[in-house]
Image (tube, rainbow, N blue to C red):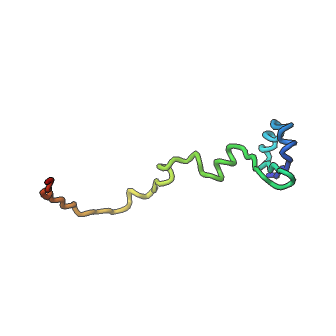
Amino acid sequence: MSITTISSREFNHDTSGAKKATREGPVIITDRGKPAHVLLSIEEYQKLTGIGTSIVELLVMPDASDIDFETERAVITPRSVDLS
């Protein structure tokens, strides 16, 4: 993975070249010589953020069926309500 650095002016003149460079790694876009933005491929972005994984996949426990879990039945008793 290589990191490419280009100026914002170069990015504006050759956007397709910057997009192609993301195949090799992140592209840092500078503004007045200082890093300002990073351009990533969608695959790299998803790796970094974890986006693309559903909440169900994150919460799944493969061995959950092996867990013994017993609860007591909840006792709920109604009470009278004073609406006056």
Q: Is residue 63 left or right of residue 11?
A: left
Name the quadrant containing residue 21.
top right
Q: Is residue 5 above or below residue 13?
A: below
* Residue located 32% across and 62% down the image: 69
Across and down, in percent, residue 43 comes to 68, 45
Name the foreground residue: 80 vs 20: 80
Q: Is residue 1 left or right of residue 63?
A: right
Name the foreground residue: 50 vs 7: 7
* Residue located 80% across and 46% down the image: 24
Q: Is residue 37 above or below residue 19?
A: below
Name the foreground residue: 62 vs 33: 33
Residue found at the very far front of the displayed protein: 84
* Residue located 73% across and 46% down the image: 40
* Residue located 55% across and 48% down the image: 53
In this figure, what is the number of numbered marks?
Answer: 0
Q: Is residue 53 above or below residue 68?
A: above
Across and down, in percent, residue 35 comes to 80, 54
Across and down, in percent, residue 42 comes to 68, 43
Across and down, in percent, residue 83 comes to 15, 53
The C terminus: image quadrant: bottom left
